[in-house]
Amino acid sequence: MLCRDAKFRVSTCLQVRLLREHAPSKVYLVNDPVESNQVGEEIDSLQLREKVGDRLYAEHLPVRVAKELLTEQELRKFTKQSI
């Protein structure tokens, strides 16, 4: 599925672009069990390797959305199993 699809928010498309252009050297996906528990579905956080301003995360991305927009190879490359 292309990110140009109208069902995806601009922020989601920017997250995918960030991953494709900078993972895993500057950003990676890591499972967020706390957020996953709160929303009732598996959620990944985009974690930056170095802070940008006061931020170390580039928000959350539902795993189901990541699976729609990224290939299995990309998911393996971009995912860090533990912090």
Image (cartoon, rainbow, N blue to C red):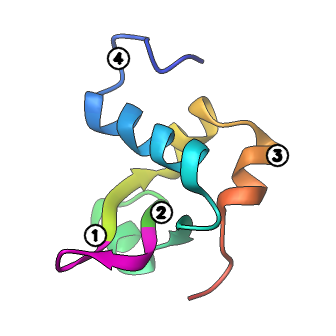
Give percent across and percent down for residue 3.
Answer: 47, 21
Is 35 situated above or below 67?
below
Q: Are marks 2 and 1 in contact (CB under 8 Å)?
A: no
* Category of crowding for the residue at label 2, using alpha-carbon neighbours closer than 10 angstroms: few (below 14), some (14–19), many (at least 20): many
Name the element at disc 3: helix
Q: Is residue 48 left or right of residue 9?
A: right
Identified by mark 4, the residue type is Lys
Q: Are marks 4 and 1 in contact (CB under 8 Å)?
A: no
Q: Is residue 78 left or right of residue 73?
A: left
Q: Nearer the viewer, mark 2 or mark 1?
A: 2
Tell me what residue is drawn at x 66 percent, y 74 percent: 80
The disc at residue 38 is 1
Name the element at disc 4: loop
Give percent across and percent down for residue 21.
Answer: 57, 45
As drawn, the residue found furthest toward the right would be: 73
Q: Is residue 21 left or right of residue 75?
A: left
* Category of crowding for the residue at label 4, using alpha-carbon neighbours closer than 10 angstroms: few (below 14), some (14–19), many (at least 20): few
Q: Is residue 50 magenta?
A: yes
Tell me what residue is drawn at x 34 percent, y 11 percent: 6
Of labels 3 and 2, earlier in sequence is 2
Of labels 3 and 1, earlier in sequence is 1
The disc at residue 73 is 3
Of labels 2 and 1, earlier in sequence is 1
Q: Which residue is mark 2?
A: 44
Q: Are marks 3 and 2 in contact (CB under 8 Å)?
A: no
Q: Nearer the viewer, mark 4 or mark 1?
A: 4
Q: Nearer the viewer, mark 3 or mark 2?
A: 3
Task: Calculate the distance from the C-alpha at mark 4 to the C-alpha at mark 1.
Answer: 23 Å
Magenta stretch bounds: 47-56
